[in-house]
Image (spheres, helix red, strand yellow):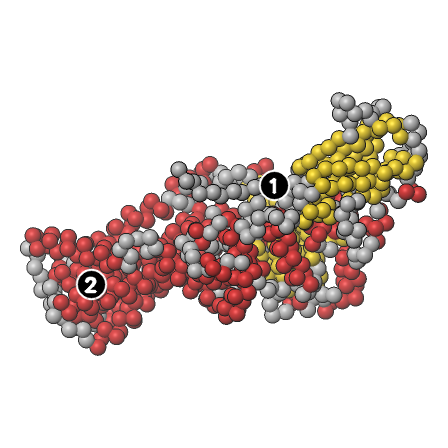
Amino acid sequence: MQTIIKVENLSKKFRIGKLRSDEGTLRDLVGNFIKLPFRKRHEKSEAETLWALKDINFEVYQGDTLGIVGGNGAGKSTLLKILSRIIKPTTGRARLGGRVGSLLEVGTGFHPDLTGRENVFLNGAVLGMQRREIEKKFDEIVAFAEIEKFIDTPVKFYSTGMYMRLAFAVAAHLEPDILIVDEVLAVGDAAFQNKCLGKMGEAVGSGRTVLFVSHSSMMVEKLCRSALYLKDGKLENYGAAKPILAQYETDHGLNPAAETISRNSPDIKDGEVRFVEWSISNSAPQQPHTIVSRERAEFEFQLVCRRQNANLRFNFAVQDSDGRPLIVASSVSADKAAAKVGEGAYRLRWTCHLPLQAGFYRLVAEAASTDDDTLVDTWRCEPELEILPSPDDFIGEQLQGLINVPVKFDLARDVS
Amino acid sequence: MLTKYSTGELTNPTESIQAHLQQSGDGEDDLLTGKDSIVIESSNFISSIDLISIWKYRELLYFLALRDIKIRYKQTLLGIAWVLLQPIVTTAIFTTIFLRLGTSQDLTVPYPLFAFSGFTLWTFINSAITNCSGSLINHSNLITKVYFPRLIIPFSAALATLLDLVFGLMSLMFAMLIYGVVPNWRMLLLPLLIVPTLLLALGIGIFTAALNVKYRDVKYILPFLIQIFFFISPVFYSLSMLPEESVALWQFNPLTGILENFRALLFGLPFDFYSFGVSVTVSVLIFLTAIYTFHRLEDDFADVI
């Protein structure tokens, strides 16, 4: 396998805040020039600068998919912008062995007054495509965006969904050797995201090298084989995706009890309570972790308890990809006491309707002891929960809310 | 779960990279030295201007210019007529003033036609400089989101203005016919004059565009400077109206040679090679200085814009 990206001692220094107060305008420039002989030059102190990236070294081999994760201000975007040649590093260098296509946003260069067709050509050229290449793929792009009828309408009349679809369609048909993608996928609804992920999966399948930046470890996990973890501008870790994502999530409190706990029942030690498996018992047997939106789901959790006479309460949460809890349920309430358990295996059922849009969700299960009020187990459930679109969902427009509730429409002629 | 994480179906990329490094030795990176390879380093000022990549992105130049043209007159009632209105109105005003003052010099053509020819070219220079100097700021969303040679932006702005000049020249031909001045074959040489004009406008435009990114003062100073430029150039007057001793001084202004020879070609007067030579030299120098300045500043555009 050949190295396609090689980054050596890459650093980027920024000045903190805005320009120094006395060199912001031309007047000050002239003023400083006159004063120049009377003052020391370069009196900038290190305190005014910030190393957004410091001594980054890594290599990516051809055909790999690398996810770059890190908290806010960790230097992800800076790294991406340097590799996209938008900004220059302060020191060090990076070498890229091929055509680079970088998507730091979708629809760069789109102008509201131009038609869909005009914008496709403009945007394609901005992304570095040749006109012939765009012409060849034009029909494909329009079909992917599903806006055949509106291709000659100015994009300012498009809905947000149509606009996003067209913008992404152009980007998706870019065929560089190295594809650099920022969190553009974080926009749009779940169905659109899935489409985008599918397209990126194709790029990976055809041997392209993909660099993908996200703060959502869920997306990185789905898409990337390796991961690079940036922390305060330094490279914290680099390697196979899963362990690095686990480390990132632990560091950022996304996953309080790190997935370093074994969930194989023979490994469970005395005194421990562990969730072992989960499924939806009323869904199709070949897809036990999938349910149709708004349908009643019977969650079933296998639980192993190696503790005598424990009083336990169970909490469940359905989270979106950012870790925001959307549905939280608890087994204990004013009139429901904690469950008494002893040593053995248990089967725990939890039934509810899931009025959520189609997409992937994270399920978190918690067991807490009410005796001493401690958390005995937290499980970020594997695999994750997938919600399928309901057959009576509205289709076409991509304007979808987070919550999917049954709606009845009725149109009647007003006779009065 | 633990075992699945550490040894599962995924190959460990760090291992394969290390393995690769060991086996490849010095013949290391075929891809990294291949024809499409790119080296990203900190800015150094010795680096040459990447003309090849500008050529590679020539289609973007075309599309950006096209975009400029298309959106400039969208949702305007008069559309392209705005391009003609400005020189026509200015010509009318200056004609009135000049007739009142009674300065009737021998210009070989009627004053309105004389002035109109000047304003046609001036309108182009004025809008080319203005569009160029604001172009980087106006395209800041492109600069911070995609890579392409930044020079493309001011170039496309000037290119878009060139279309206005074509319409201006067409209306000028029309005006000449009205005044009974028959267009002659020497007009075919006009493009020869347009080149230094374009270089001059591009030079000033690119220089101010680059400065404008960091110092927004340019936006306020520039209209003022353009106005001075207008008065010290023979747009609405002829060199022959000036005292003889100031002519030599005037000729340092590259626009003097351009305007005078522009009229010479239009109205069949003798072509002055000396003043044309001065114009070309000064325009090229301004253009090269601007490109150099732009090149030195462009690495910081995305950081400071």
Q: Circle 2 sits on which residue? A: B117
Q: Amino acid at mark 2?
A: Ser
Mark 2–mark 1 distance (CA, rounded to whole Å): 71 Å
Q: Quadrant of residue A331?
A: top right
Q: Position of residue B11 (x, y in %)?
A: 79, 58
Residue B85, visible in the rendered structure: yes
| Chain on which label 2 sits | B
Looking at numbered disc 1 in the image, what kind of residue is underneath it? Pro
Q: Is residue B283 visible?
A: no
Q: Which of these two is toward me, B256 or B90?
A: B90
Residue A311 versus residue A155 in the image, above or below:
above
Q: Which residue is at the far bottom? A: B185
Relative to A336, residue B289 above or below: below
Picture residue at 25% right of the left edge, 58% below the top: B81
Q: At which x and y percent is residue A72?
A: 63, 41
Q: SS at mark 1? A: loop
The residue at the far front in this view is A415
Label 2 element class: helix
Q: Position of residue A364 (x, y in %)?
A: 75, 38
User: Badge 2, how many Cα within 10 Å: few under 14, some, many 20+?
Assistant: many
- The residue shown at (63%, 50%) is A391
Q: Residue at left 32%, top 64%?
A: B163
Q: Which residue is mark 1?
A: A406
